[in-house]
Image (cartoon, helix red, strand yellow):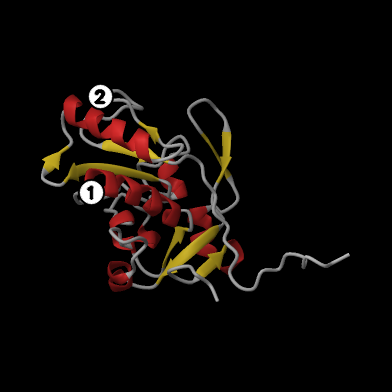
Amino acid sequence: MSTLPLPLALADDLPREVRQVLRPGESLQDRSGAAHVLPSSFLRVDSWSQALETPLTEHFKLWELIGVDVREAPLLRSFPRYVPCAVVLLASALELFRLAVGTPVHVAANGGYRSPGHALSRHASRHCWGTAANIYRIGDTYLDSREEIEKYAAIARRVIPGVWVRPYGPEDGQADDHLHVDIGYTLFDPVDGPDDSPSADAS
């Protein structure tokens, strides 16, 4: 039995028009020109109510990491939607951060998963991998100053292994009104069913 919170959908399971937007297995280039392969394993989300009800960790539900506006590709604003499986790894990383700060952590609209067809998806944004989050508020504190952003950035670096945090500032590649955290170009291709590895006594 799968331990995933929702059904697994592989690239070949996707409707053709969805594949054209998500581009599974294709490459996007980052700012330096390096190519990164897009996800090919997705969770199928059948409704917004399902997203509201699906926990990824103790303190994060799926809806918090998939909220988008009209800048998302029209096809991907309706359901079913397909979200990279690595979003469960992002939620686990955010859970470590949530436990460290001891108060609710709020992710902005368009601040979690965004498809390659989203208007804000440039230069192989890690948001397209489902591995990045833009946090705009922690508890009652809005992250709109250098002091607050750098304070919580230090906590994120301390508790999330391998995390990358955008430096404070107004320039491209920086952030001055949110805390951007991500766990890189992470692909998660889970086993969905019996373990098909060779048995220990196989010759």
Crowd tier of the residue under label 2, counting other residues whose Cα lies within 10 Å: few below 14, some 14–19, many 20 or above: few
Residue 189 point in image, percent of width and height: 58, 57
Query: Label 2 belongs to which residue?
Result: 170
Image disc number at residue 144: none
SS assignment at label 2: loop
Crowd tier of the residue under label 1, counting other residues whose Cα lies within 10 Å: few below 14, some 14–19, many 20 or above: many
Q: Quadrant of the C terminus?
A: bottom right
Q: How many marks?
A: 2
Q: In terms of image quadrants, where is residue 181?
A: top left
Taking depth in this image into account, of 148 and 31 the one nearest to the observer is 148
Query: Which residue corresponds to the image point at 52% horizontal and 45% vertical from the top-left?
Result: 186
- Type of residue at label 2? Pro
Q: Residue furthest left?
A: 140
Residue 157 point in image, percent of width and height: 36, 33
Query: Which residue corresponds to the image point at 60% horizontal and 51% vertical from the top-left?
Result: 25
Residue 184 point in image, percent of width and height: 47, 39
Q: Up-down: is 73 above or below 175?
A: below
Q: Quadrant of the N terminus?
A: bottom right
Q: Up-down: is 166 above or below 82?
A: above
Q: Does residue 14 show up?
A: no
Q: Residue furthest front?
A: 201
Residue 110 appears left or right of 46: left
Query: Label 1 belongs to which residue?
Result: 105
Q: In terms of image quadrants, where is residue 88?
A: bottom left
Residue 63 point in image, percent of width and height: 30, 61
